[in-house]
Amino acid sequence: MSTESILASLAPSGTLRATINVGNPILAAVEKTTGAPRGVSVDIARELAQRLGAPLECVVVAAAAKSVETVASGRADVGFFAVDPVRGADIAFTEPYVTIEGCFLVRRDSPIRDYSQVDAPDTRVAAGAGSAYDLFLTRELQRATIIRVPTSPAVVDAFVEQGLEVAAGVKQQLEADAARHGGLRLIEEPFMVIRQAMGIAKARGDLAAQYLRAFIADLKASGFVREALARHGIKGATPG
């Protein structure tokens, strides 16, 4: 596969457009001083652009669902998402490059102690709309009600303000929000493992998807992902 043919499939405009979801603080955030995105996913996108010999354009979004939509519609070339069968209808995924935990947060005096107690008729669970854990809980919860909020960073605020019973999210985000609010308790046992991967629209064809899979496999084998996690001070995430 020549670089030219890969570039034509993967970044036909000549510029690699990568969606960066800053709603997941494990993988990306906005630099306060410059407003530019930074993080593990940005480092990976930059490395891919360098290998293709193309400039990089970061398309910053605030929620995972928006990231998927942007890539599926062709407004960006590649993105960083959690693997999910619903998303797999339009997106071809690589193998995960990192895994993180999805957990529940409750009030300190809540009777809820584990996952089995969450799925009850009188339980309302706050979740980021279209997030990997929203998609998972939509399939798994039969009796509880999911209250969807626009972005994952807004979940705990909505949980507190609306007096909901449970907040769902990425463990590290919940821990940070619990420290900010006080009076909250993390249920340590995760309800899911979130498998973060790169992805490209299936409409781009097999050639681009195969190249992307090989690229991520190489980054994992070389230690690039582990080094990026350490460089950005990310704890609690495991290289895939």
Image (cartoon, rainbow, N blue to C red):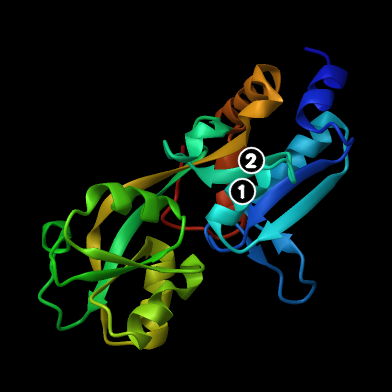
Q: Which mark is residue 138?
A: none
Q: In this image, 114 relative to 57: left or right?
A: left
Q: Amino acid at mark 1?
A: Glu
Q: In this image, 152 relative to 28: left or right?
A: left
Q: Amino acid at mark 2?
A: Ala
Dot 1 lies on which element? helix
Q: Quadrant of the N terminus?
A: top right
Q: Which residue is mark 1?
A: 69
Q: In front here: 18 or 204?
A: 204
Q: In this image, 137 relative to 238: left or right?
A: left
The spot of residue 110 in percent (x, y) is 15, 79
> For the point 82% across and 30% down, which residue is it?
52
How many neighbours does mark 2 have within 10 angstroms: few (below 14), some (14-19), or many (20 or more)?
many
> For the point 19% across and 70% down, which residue is it?
123
Q: Which picture quadrant has residue 144?
A: bottom left
Whether residue 72 is situated above or below residue 10 in the rendered picture: below
How many neighbours does mark 1 have within 10 angstroms: few (below 14), some (14-19), or many (20 or more)?
some
Q: Which residue is mark 2?
A: 72
> For the point 82% across and 36% down, which residue is it?
50
Dot 2 lies on which element? helix
Q: Which picture quadrant has residue 126?
A: bottom left
Asked if disc 2 and disc 1 are in contact, CB closer than 8 Å, the reply is yes
Q: Which picture quadrant has residue 159?
A: bottom left
